[in-house]
């Protein structure tokens, strides 16, 4: 087992003559945010904010885009982890009138395809940026990203902040927390409602506890799903995908349990916001 590990490490770490990794390469920060601009609206309806959260497993299943077309109907925001910029996905953005921003984690050396986290919306964002983890999975492979954007709210001066994360896997709890803490100033400096969602890779009780504790300290509450037991689990039985919010009221939230095209089940939720909203209580 140890020899096998060394062989894998050697293959991953050994560069090509070009200086690129045999499997992937990590783009510079300034080249890591890609966009497809095609926004229909200038502001979000505060009475009906609808999101879909889904780790799409790099779109490996040939039928996953068919599911995405169906599940994204009547949705304002798509928060995708493990996005991959294949032509069919780009066509989906165009045909369904989605504007999209993707924070690229790495690029496959052979195919040049880019993978990362993305936020797609029908509303033009006021500002978009991302944070790359300082650490890498297994200490020598790839970093993970979180992407965040701000959206004008119709008839309100405040903006909606959305954060989409694909958390580091195969790392210590403290390393995962280090990635979460990249959002600390972002959250503390924001005065409006917040949605923080994604694949948190909470494979242990310690990670679950510390993720929820961090969110509580930041003033966010976990969204409860009507069929939350259907959420995807790690091999040892822990839920991986979450939605947390601040100053939003949850209208409904459910897991799309009949989805079969990824190793994660999509999460769907709707909210409303008013200036009197103080949390996401039902």
Image (cartoon, rainbow, N blue to C red):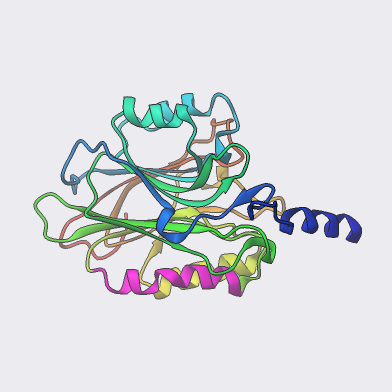
Residue ID at (37%, 33%): 72
Q: Position of residue 34 (x, y in %)?
A: 39, 47
Q: Main secondary structure of the magenta part?
A: helix
Name the foreground residue: 156 vs 256. Answer: 156
Total tally of numbered discs in the picture: 0
Residue 208 visible here: yes
Q: Is residue 147 left or right of residue 74?
A: right
Residue 223 visible here: no
Instruction: Work out which quarter of the rendered image holds the N terminus and state it.
Output: bottom right
Asked whether residue 186 is drawn in magenta, I would say: yes
Name the foreground residue: 203 vs 187. Answer: 187
* Vertical arrangement, residue 67 with respect to residue 186, above or below: above
Name the foreground residue: 80 vs 2. Answer: 2
Identify the image quadrant of residue 161: bottom left
Residue ID at (22%, 63%): 192
* Vertical arrangement, residue 65 with respect to residue 118, above or below: above
Q: Is residue 193 left or right of residue 267?
A: left
Instruction: Work out which quarter of the rendered image holds the C terminus and state it.
Output: bottom left
Q: Position of residue 221 (x, y in %)?
A: 39, 63
Asked whether residue 208 is drawn in magenta, I would say: no
Magenta stretch in the rendered image:
174-190
Q: Position of residue 173 (x, y in %)?
A: 62, 71
* Vertical arrangement, residue 95 with respect to residue 56, above or below: above
Q: Is residue 138 left or right of residue 225?
A: right
Residue ID at (16%, 46%): 43
The single residue placed furthest to the front in the displayed view is: 17
Q: Position of residue 219 (x, y in %)?
A: 35, 71
């Amino acid at each position: 087992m140890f020899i096998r590990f060394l062989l894998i490490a050697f293959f991953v770490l050994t560069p090509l003559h070009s200086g690129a990794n045999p499997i992937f390469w990590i783009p510079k920060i300034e080249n890591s945010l890609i966009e497809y601009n095609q926004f229909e609206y200038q502001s979000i309806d505060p009475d009906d904010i609808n999101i879909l959260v889904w780790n799409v497993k790099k779109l490996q299943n040939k039928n996953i885009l068919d599911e995405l077309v169906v599940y994204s109907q009547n949705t304002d925001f798509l928060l995708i982890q493990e996005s991959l910029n294949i032509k069919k996905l780009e066509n989906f953005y165009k045909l369904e009138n989605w504007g999209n921003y993707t924070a690229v984690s790495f690029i496959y050396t052979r195919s040049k395809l880019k993978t990362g986290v993305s936020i797609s919306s029908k509303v033009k964002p006021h500002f978009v940026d991302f944070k790359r983890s300082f650490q890498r999975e297994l200490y020598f492979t790839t970093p993970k990203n979180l992407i965040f954007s701000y959206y004008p709210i119709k008839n309100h001066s405040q903006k909606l902040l959305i954060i989409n994360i694909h958390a580091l896997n195969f790392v210590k709890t403290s390393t995962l927390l280090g990635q979460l803490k990249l959002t600390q100033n972002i959250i503390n400096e924001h005065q409006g409602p917040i949605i923080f969602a994604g694949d948190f890779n909470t494979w242990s009780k310690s990670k679950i506890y510390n993720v929820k504790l961090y969110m509580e300290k930041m003033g966010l509450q976990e969204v409860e799903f009507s069929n939350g037991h259907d959420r995807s689990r790690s091999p040892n039985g822990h839920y991986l995908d979450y939605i947390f919010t601040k100053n939003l009221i949850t209208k409904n939230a459910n897991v799309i349990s009949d989805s079969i095209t990824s190793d994660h089940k999509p999460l769907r939720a709707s909210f409303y916001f008013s200036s009197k909203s103080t949390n996401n209580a039902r």
